Amino acid sequence: MTTSANFLTTAAKPEINSLYGFKRKQPSQTPDIEHPSDECIWQNFLVANRIIHLLRPDFFMIYKFSKSTILYEHNINLDLHAQNVTTQKIMQYLTPGDLDHIRSIDKIMIQVTTERKLQPLDYVYRICGNMECPNTTLKRILRTSFLIHSNAAGMPELGFFCFHDVSTLFSSIRPKNYDISFDYGHEHLKDEVMMRLQRLKLPQTIITPRELDILRHIDKGMSSKEIASCLFISKTTVDTHRQNMLRKWDLPNTAALLKRAREEDWI
């Protein structure tokens, strides 16, 4: 779950602004015992609930809802073949179709969390996505998120994201690649989320240059192995792109994919 609807717009300059609009937090101020700082709140939460020990994430981040601000982010073991692994880099490397998919579901979760005044750990929200990292095959990541603090009025204040590299567990991320678990007393909200998602018209995704390359080779009758050799990428990467295209346009097979490509004048 992201922190505001503002996150649903793509930044004009992703190399400068995070695709989800996060800003860096300013240096900490003098602690106030009666009004504990955000740092004190989230650190105590993580310690009390042993979150990092239990989840063992490759990367995690704490954020503030109201100001879309990163309070803390830490890379433990997530290799993106980049000098610095940050939340911005992670969102930047997500494939366009998966980024749109995540934004759409995040938007619903923001609405439900705010409207229902959900409390810490009332839900755990997991979603998967494919990443195109420099000089490597596609990576598959699992993002887990939940609320860790609400204010006295019941409005969300602090949230938690963590990422796991699940590339060795899945050959590709398929449709409905998310799961939302609600705590006792809130189970009915899962049906509400599903109904809102059904009413939500997902944006059409523009085909990427790599997908276009693969489509043109498929149209020539080439197998995934042959395409991989021609494009100097792995067969797994080709198969993942093919699955992504089928999912994005809700198509049953390769024949339907080629038919759609011709209708769109892609091939």
Image (spheres, helix red, strand yellow):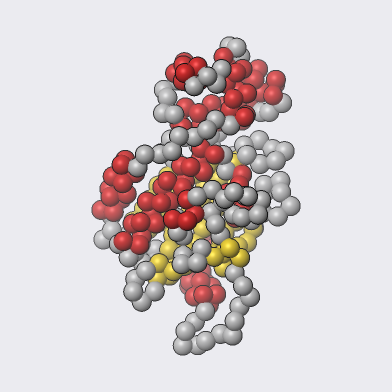
- The N terminus sits in image quarter: bottom left
Residue drawn at 57 percent across, 68 percent down: 71
Q: How far from the left and from the top, in percent, is residue 147?
A: 43, 63
Between 12 and 84, which is closer to the camera in this rendering? 12
Can you see residue 95? yes
Task: Decide: is 236 above or below 83.
Answer: above
Can you see residue 145? no
Quarter of the figure with residue 24: bottom right
Residue drawn at 48 percent across, 42 percent down: 100
Q: How far from the left and from the top, in percent, is residue 46?
A: 51, 69
Image check: 126 left or right of 140? left
- The C terminus sits in image quarter: top right
Q: Residue furthest front?
A: 12
Between 43 and 96, which is closer to the camera in this rendering? 96
Residue drawn at 59 percent across, 69 percent down: 25
Quarter of the figure with residue 256: top left
Q: How far from the left and from the top, in percent, is residue 138?
A: 62, 37
